[in-house]
Image: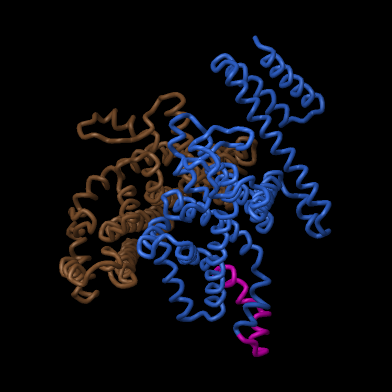
Amino acid sequence: MSVFVIIYFACLIASSCLAAYYEKRPTFLTLFSLTLISFVLGIVGGVPALRFVATAAGLLAFAAGISFAFREFIVIIAPANISKEVRTAPLTAAFGMFVIFTYAIAGIFAPWIAPYGESEVIASAFAMPDENMLLGADQLGRDMFSRIIYGARNTVGLALLATLAAFFMGAFAGLLAATKGGWFDQFMGRFADVIMSIPSLIFALLMLSIFGPQVTVIIVAVAIIYAPRVFRLTRAVAGNVVVMDYIEAAKLRGEKTWYLIRKEILPNSTAPLIAEFGLEFCFVFLLVAGLSFLGLGIQPPTADWGSMVRENATMISFGEITPLIPAAAIALLTVAVNFVVDWMLFRSSGLKE
Amino acid sequence: MGDLLGLVAKRLGFGLLTLLVISVIIFFMVELLPGDIAQAVLGQGATEENLAALREQMGLNKPAVVRYFEWLGNALTGDFGTSIVTGERVSTIITERFINTLFLAAYAAVIAVPFAVTLGIVVALLRNTLFDRVVNVLTLTSISSPEFFLGYILILYLAVKTGMFPAISSLRPGMTFWELLDRTFLPALTLVLVVTAHMMRMTRAAIINLLASPYIEMARLKGAPPWKVIVRHALPNAWAPIINVIALNLAYLITGVVLVEVVFVYPGIGQALVDAVSKRDFPIVQSCCLIFAATFILLNLAADVAAILTNPRLRHPK
């Protein structure tokens, strides 16, 4: 029995005793059941299995710690009304905000953070990591780490632009349809139905095959594909606002459609729209990543997470995990946005169950 | 019963209409090309004679509306024209691949559907416990990961490091059924992971939604145990949303399959579509898109019809 195993079980048992002593029932149950499971795991999988559990728990604790610290940080620096909201946020949401913040920093300051340029060839193909290159080189000998940093700017930037385009188109059409009503509303509704009944990836592939894989085409294609979803939601939310008395009053005052949308309807339907923006971003981000994985996204030599996975996929058959890092970066950001959206939806709906 | 049939017929009619509109979109989208298909295929350096010959061969001299109806009529009888790049019949390229794709999707669905629905019910029963939260975070992670991420993780750990399953799903004619299942296990598992997460979350939401209704409160107050409340009282009313969820996710499988096929080099229709897109082989792109869209719509249609048929209020009219 190695020292690691002894320390492992000593830590678990000591902390479950502490939890039991302070009457923290859920914590105690979790810790103690983990101890029991570890006995079985240790017998079946040996030390590596226990090491895996310890690493996972350590990572989890690290993530929880950093989320907690980040939440406190926001509570202190944010103005009073925001910090009151943030104080009640669950740790997952704080974690999400932390990840989004990190990505934003990486994307904005990419040229200063990355040690090399995104298309600079500095080593031989698939060179191993050394003190110059944190993650080694890719299939053309470019620094993997620098390309991942630049990818934060290119991939996320493209997804953000596309989401904004889809969002503004959809929200504008939705607000207009809710305010105008009548045949315009009907027509837009049917139109949205038709677009939504084509699978999004297939529709994107169709458009890209015709107009070629350029950034503008991707943005327009994504905007056309996702605008109907935003339209549906905006139409539904604004539809509830339009029937209010104050809208009637504004109409009687003789206000124009544009004023009604901007001053009366929009301020009263922002909360669900912001949550929808987050969700929409996740869909768009995954679609764009999928397209660039298929070689139809941002074209080389610009660094882009999806195509990086594809180009370095051969390394996976040698047991390397480096090609998975860009894919993990995509997954992490999507999870983070989802966590934050979950919290916002929970808060705005006031759901307790 | 008349009402019920009327509803179903109306829904079917609407589905067919959507399909027609989509075929129009798919066909006329290609007409938006700067120049025409012949120009796009041969490039800028093409001579006038070559262009004219290709136009003649593809029948581009007829008006677009006439060509649309010919194309649609041929597609309905299973004739999708010929590939621009290789000159093969599109139907011979696609048919076998389409069967492969359907096999993969069915394989994934057979594992995912029972698993996801059971898990969804269990999680609804144990809602707001630690187990629920852990499952919530895990499914959220699975949904948020791109399909190729999950696929490569599975390749790395189940194929490269442990060698339990083959990393590439190449199919040969004359394979036994077991060999086939073994070869396609990893792509199927990738699809299962993605779809299960969606389906489970939606099943949980559907059941929890119902648990707020007064008749469930009544069942609880009369002292029925929690599992009985769910299985006897909530589930019969939850079937409609759950069937809807299943069908929606089967439809989702159809698009998810494209990326997974590329990751595992599986000879399916998604791979054919991606190849055709980068070669700009429009007849193949159009037919693949039409097949994908039709499958997607048919599944959605099936979901709606099943929802109508399982709705207790419609089945037993007052």
Asked whether residue B201 is in view, the answer is yes
Q: Where's the N terminus of chain A, which quadrant? A: top right
Chain with brown colouring: B
Q: Give residue B280's position: percent from left, percent from top.
A: 31, 59
The residue lying toward the viewer, choosing from B26 and B49, is B49
**Residue drawn at (58%, 17%), measured in percent from left and top?**
A40
Q: Is residue A322 above or below residue B87?
A: above
Q: Is residue B51 above or below residue B95?
A: below
Give the quadrant of residue A30: top right
Q: Is residue B89 left or right of residue A197?
A: left
Q: Give residue B262's position: percent from left, percent from top.
A: 37, 44
Magenta stretch, main secondary structure, is helix
Give the quadrant of residue B15: bottom left
Chain A, colour shown: blue
Q: Give residue A241's position: percent from left, percent from top.
A: 62, 73
The residue lying toward the viewer, choosing from B53 and B15, is B53
Q: In this view, does A240 lie above or below B128?
A: below
Q: Is residue A239 magenta?
A: yes
Q: In this view, does A174 lie to the left or right of B58?
A: right
Q: Does the magenta stretch include residue A77?
A: no
Looking at the rendering, the stretch of residues picked out in magenta corresponds to A234-256
Q: In this view, does A17 lie above or below A101?
A: above
